[in-house]
Amino acid sequence: MTSSPLDRLLRPQTIAVFGGREARRVVEQCDRMGFSGEIWPVHPKLDEVLGRPCYRSVSDLPQAPDAAFVGVNRTLTVEIVRSLAAAGAGGAVCYASGFSEATAELADGTDLQQALLSAAGGMPILGPNCYGLINGLDGAPLWPDQHGMKRIEYGVAILTQSSNIAINLTMQTRGLPIAYVVTAGNQAQTSLADVACALIEDPRVTAIGLHVEGFGDVSGLERLAAIARQSKKPVVVLKVGRSEQAKQAAVSHTASLAGSDAVADAVLARLGIGRVQSLPALLETLKLLHVAGPLPGRSISSMSCSGGEASLMADAAVGRNIEFPPLQPQQLPCLRRVLGEMVTLSNPLDYHTFVWGDFARQTEAFSAMFKGGYALNLVVLDFPRSDRCDASEWAMTADAVITAVSATGALAGLLATLPENMPEPVADRLMANGIVAFSGIDEAMVAAEVAAGIGRAWDRPPPLPLLDVRPMDGEIETLTEADAKIELSACGLRVPRGLQAFSPREAAQQGEQLGFPVVLKGLGIAHKTEAGAVVLDLRNSQAVSDAAAAMDCDSGYLVEKMIEPPVAELIVGAIRDPVFGLSLTLGAGGIFVELLEDSVILPLPATRAEIHAAISRLKIAKLIHGYRGRPRGDLEAAVDAVAATAEYVVKNAVRLEELDLNPLMVLPEGRGVAAVDALIRRRR
């Protein structure tokens, strides 16, 4: 196992506890979990805590502890951390609040947090404002409260900023073996990504789950993703704030599409980190990843003894990147023989109750289904209440699944449609036999989709490092469309021939020079179409002059050659996210931006292959490919144009704040593309 600065804190042999009630609770939890190392209470007045003699200060301890729980007030916390660091301790949990998260009444909290960091120096600390950690592998909880974990030999690690959510997660009865729970509080020094990188190196950890309120360390996230891929231990994230849009005012259409949450989705997908939207989905996904790791594909089979359940399963896959493929021809003879003529052989399969209570026939039917080459095989089974019912035949069905998995080597899950209908002892037994004990249909579908997504990401070459450029200071300026197009044209992007004018008469003259028909636009106006500052298909000088006079535009005009009708219109843009920096947005352009909400976000830098794949994922790609006999669009020219735009963004990342091409017209195959509108906002 690779050595980490956090090793002593996460896997301590000696623990010092500071404080009164909270420190005593830590000792209680250590005793309950059977911690075999030394525990040293430190208190200025008490003589003993739970039979252990108290020490008066850090200097009185037998040696520098591997880990310390500091459960005192915030001011004294700083002093104790300083003494621990000087003594060579392995790390500390800082329980106290009132640091950078403090309200106006505690305005010195940020200064105190900085003092805490200075006091810690190179010694790792968790928090402040956190409960600490529970190590269920070694029975080492630095935790001042009750919890639901037990000693295990291997399992998943769950990390969160929220101590209360951590407590709730330890109380799960779903059969998920939890090796570690770690809370990070303010993450003043040690981030969740730092802890995850250390835990993933533990050979007893199978997967990592993160509950985060925000990403402050993108480089740490990249490092975690790289270690996860290398060690074959997947990571799944529950990030709150999905409804939050970009906080800055949206000047362009790109800004309205590229909310911060959408950018987070794109970055996580690129890194091969899964994402879920709820705590139950996090737990169910971790179960699947613990048993099987990433899935090799997105195909699923389902068996149940009810047509209603089969329909629920089929519906749950709609809109997700998973599928229920048809049964394979080689599966049909055995299934028909075992299940009889009354059963419709399909996937999902309703096997009725013809094999219910018959262990041999159930095993044969399950084995035949599991031989279809599916990435995941599900058997729907809700157990009855143990206090009122006899569950022996349900237990027999579970035994048949276990036997079928042993015979075929397939990956299977037993799925209770209602979480309360999967008893914890059953779930524990299934998981111990390599069968995922799923609770909830939707959560199981999420788990399969996420695990398949991680598998696809790991099958691709490792991603390029994310563009990490801090913006320069300075006032933001908005280029005129004419100036923006001059810059973009210089980097290889095709734009219509155009000339500027500063009066209606000059605009008419420029139209004559370009050759009709032309387009007239007012300069210095955002969202020109909505403002009536765009007039198309002007066919003579008088029409141009009249249109310019009607606009009465103080910043002048842009007269451009009219472009032939396109096959499709795209939007291509970039906007700076406060956490992830600049990324590229592709989508259906023109009037379809808000109507279709059809867009894909590409973290930068982006390869041509990634750009090609992104365009292909758009709904509007059907038009580019020649929808219902219509002409095909120039896809390669569109990829070239997006690549040129991406290169411009990367080269100008220090100054650029926002870029918007809408629409980028995709012309018929062989005719190229044309960016007919452009917006650039950058620092002066």
Image (tube, helix red, strand yellow):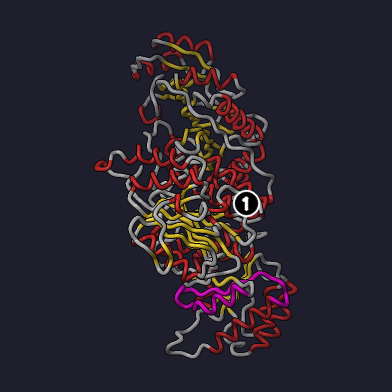
Q: Mark 1 points at which residue?
A: 228
Q: In this view, does 667 lie to the left or right of 573?
A: right
Q: What residue type is labelled 1?
A: Ala
Q: Can residue 409 be seen in this view?
A: yes
Residue 229 vs 290, above or below: the answer is above
Q: Which residue is found at the position 30% from the left and 38% from the top?
A: 108
Q: In this view, does 49 lie to the left or right of 263?
A: left
Q: In this view, does 452 lie to the left or right of 16?
A: right
Q: Can residue 275 be seen in this view?
A: no
State the quadrant of the N terminus: bottom right
Task: Residue 538 in the image: state x and y as whole percent.
Answer: 46, 21
State the quadrant of the C terminus: top left
Q: Which of 27 and 146 is in front in this view?
A: 27
Density class for disc 1 (Cα within 10 Å; few <14, some 14-19, many ≥20) is many
Q: Magenta stretch?
A: 406-432
Q: Which residue is found at the position 51% from the left and 75% from the top?
A: 416
Task: Residue 483 in the image: state x and y as whole percent.
Answer: 49, 17
Q: Which of 257 and 433 is in front in this view?
A: 433
Q: Which of 561 and 442 is in front in this view?
A: 442
Q: Nearer the viewer, residue 157 or 123?
A: 123
Tell me the element at label 1. Answer: helix
Q: Which residue is found at the position 67% from the left and 83% from the top?
A: 363
Task: Residue 517 in the image: state x and y as whole percent.
Answer: 51, 20
150 is within the stretch colored magenta? no
Residue at the far right in the pictured view? 330
